[in-house]
Image (tube, rainbow, N blue to C red):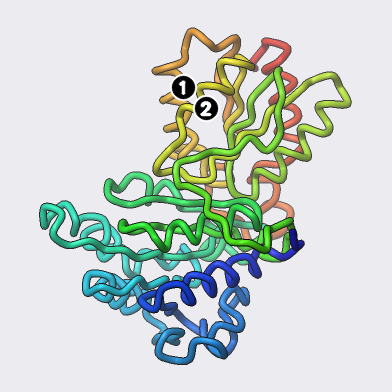
Amino acid sequence: MQRIMYREAIASALAEEMRRDEKVLVMGEDVAITGGVYKATKGLLDEFGPQRVRNTPLSELAIAGTAAGAAMCGARPVAEIMHVDFIGCCFDIVLSTMAKMHYKTNGQISVPMVLRTQQGRGRSNGCTQSQSLESLFTAIPGLKVVIPSTPYDAKGLLKTAIRDNNPVIFLEHKGLYQTKGEVPEQEYLIPLGKADVKRFGKDVTIITYSKTVLMALDAAKQLEAEGIDAEVLDLRTLVPLDFEAIRESVTKTGRVIIAHEASEFSGFGAEVAAEIADKLFDELDAPIVRVCGSNIPVPNATEPELESAPTVAKLVAAAKRVCEGGIH
């Protein structure tokens, strides 16, 4: 095992897949010489050259459109959109081309591409560069949506996503790039649609993903000191969703907290809550609780930015209320 940063795990996955398959290429703003704004493609240009590691114009429409076209012609592009907030500039490509082409052509044309992009708050970047927009993508049939929380998951899931014959949206939290974790030196893959229990527990299940997983683990440590044994379930992929893992955990604990940075209203947690209420209602010992972002644009000032997001303290308080049986 080696201990590396999240961004290094991304670069390692890309390099391994580019060595394995010459059809894999990387493209995006500043991905070549500088290695991208978060250095997640650093070193690729030196090994693979400018034909396979391509700087693009400052145009999300051009990036997504060129990648989709290349994918339909046999390449396996990994395109980077610098921030998910800019996805509106190319959303028609995502919505109507990437997601629909296989269906529209009755399976004759596939779009085997990965659209990597960064999201999340915590850097005081303001309301147009701090959003979490995963629910935009999960609402579009035809897309797979991956959102890893650790270097290990990021590498294994990205390699699998690149090999998938369907378009994959790969969401990376900008606050995770310098976090470290153990990653095997030998090759490995993580299947899409397989959640991971990051901490086993018996009293309450915290269902989450991305950076909020780290908060949930910190909250679980605090709760343990107060006699509450929390299970932390990291979804890892939102589409496909591993509902069987949710079923197993919820059946065991009977109490559920759903946590994510995105706005609570119409966030992905609402879908998870609806699925649980629809299929596991009789297993619940308390109402489902969500600990999510406030339904406001992300504030620029540091303190309001943090206050409008999930925190360890909010998760601890929610778990106590749920386990005590009183939701107020």
Say whether residue 155 is left or right of residue 24: right
Which residue is pictured at 73% across the width and 56% down the height? 182
Quadrant occupied by the C terminus: top right
Is residue 79 visible in the rendered structure shown here? no
Say whether residue 169 is left or right of residue 41: left
Say whether residue 202 is left or right of residue 75: right
Residue most toward the front?
Answer: 186
Is there a contact, CB below 8 Å, between mark 1 and mark 2?
A: yes
List the residue tagged with mark 2: 246
Could you say whether the residue bearing mark 2 is in a helix, strand or loop?
Answer: helix
Residue 309 screen position, x and y as percent? 64, 45
**Image: 55 above or below 301:** below
Which residue is pictured at 41% across the width and 83% down the height? 58
**Image: 215 above or below 77:** above
Which residue is pictured at 53% across the width and 71% down the height? 16
Residue 207 screen position, x and y as percent? 59, 33
Which amino acid is tagged 1?
Ile
Disc assigned to residue 167: none
- Label 1 and label 2: CA atoms lie apart by 8 Å
Residue 245 screen position, x and y as percent? 52, 29
List the residue tagged with mark 1: 276
Which amino acid is tagged 2?
Ile
Say whether residue 200 is left or right of residue 266: right
Is residue 141 visible in the rendered structure shown here? yes
Query: For residue 63, what is the image quadrant?
Result: bottom left
**Image: 58 above or below 95:** below
Decide: few, some or many residues near mark 1? Use Cα within 10 Å; few <14, some 14-19, many ≥20.
many
Decide: few, some or many residues near mark 2? Use Cα within 10 Å; few <14, some 14-19, many ≥20.
many
Q: Earlier in the sequence, mark 1 or mark 2?
A: 2
Q: Nearer the viewer, residue 174 or 184?
A: 184
Which residue is pictured at 53% across the width and 64% down the height? 118
Q: Nearer the viewer, residue 29 or 200?
A: 200
